[in-house]
Image (tube, grey):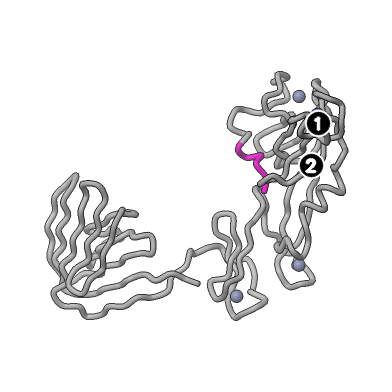
Amino acid sequence: MPEATHVIAGTCTTTFTGNRDRHQHGDVLVVVKPDGTTLVHDAAGYQPVAWLTRPEAVTVGDDAVTATDGDQRLRVDVHDAHVRGQYPTTDAGVPVAECPDCEGRLVRTRGTVSCPGCDRQYRLPTGATVTDDACDCGLPGIRVERGATFLLCLDRDCESLDERVRAAFDRAWDCLDCGEDLRVLRRGGLILGCDSYPDCETGYAFPDGVHDGTCTCGLPLFETESGRRCLDTHCEHADHSSADGSADASQGL
Ligand SMILES: [Zn+2]
Ligand SMILES: [Zn+2]
Ligand SMILES: [Zn+2]
Ligand SMILES: [Zn+2]
């Protein structure tokens, strides 16, 4: 469920000590977010007059709010509170669909689709986009590239990405080191791992891209957002490999 944000509107004295010392007094709005980020807003502009982002420690008391982070310290003495309370807050995301369970809307935030109104939450596979095509279950669909383009339900329990990738690419390619089949496996993310494991430990993260041809080394090539690359990110046939750093993007979920 949503976590609480503290809000105090009132007459306060703000004392900041650290990389710059400031002392201010006025009728202000104090906000303490669930991650501890503390903001003091006055009447003008978008910028707080004092703040501390994700401090190590915060206390919200009747007379004062104190936030400390190393040698930075923000203290807000509350002399007279006009309004104070704790209110539920969530991440704000891009709305993608109505929630099938409640009156809320499903929103997309950093790799997750969730509903602020209930506990529904779905992790998106790396590189997935949410589509307009709804599944029969009522949830939106997603588009994922793992060797081919797969259109699936957002809910893994409704439609399994693993099963679809396995049906398409299990045993599709051979291990270069021992000749056995490469299997589609899940080890955190999806991988192509040698069938003779543990005798052969060859394995590769399944690329976030579409299979397109064969590398000089014998392994498959993939067309990804960052370029055409060999299944093996360390393949010496560099003309087919993309720039360094693409390996992280291939860690599919
Ligand atoms: Zn909901
Ligand atoms: Zn579904
Ligand atoms: Zn092998
Ligand atoms: Zn190669």
Q: Is residue 107 above or below residue 143?
A: below
State which image quarter holds ligand 3.
top right
Q: Residue at point 26% right, 65% down?
A: 59
Task: Check disc 1: other Cα within 10 Å, few if <14, some if 14-19, many if 20+.
Answer: some
Q: Using the image, tell me which numbered label, if any, was put on residue 147.
A: 2
Q: Is residue 220 magenta?
A: no
Which type of secondary structure does the marked residue at label 1 adopt?
Answer: strand
Q: Nearer the viewer, residue 113 or 66?
A: 66
Q: Amino acid at mark 1?
A: Pro
Q: Residue at point 59% right, 59% down?
A: 112
Task: Tell me where residue 130 sits by quadrant.
Answer: bottom right
Q: Using the image, tell me which numbered label, if any, was put on residue 220.
A: 1
What residue span does the magenta drawing correspond to? 248-253
Q: Amino acid at mark 2?
A: Gly
Point out residue 179 in the picture as x, y percentages from the top left corner.
87, 26
Point out residue 76 in the picture as x, y percentages from the top left corner.
18, 64
Q: CA distance from mark 2 to mark 1?
A: 9 Å
Q: Nearer the viewer, residue 103 or 178?
A: 178
* Between discs 2 and 1, the one toward the N terminus: 2
Task: Tell me where residue 250 sits by quadrant.
Answer: top right
Q: Residue at point 31% right, 65% down?
A: 32
Whether label 1 lies within 8 Å of ligand 4 gets the answer no
Q: Is label 2 in contact with label 1 (beta carbons under 8 Å)? A: yes
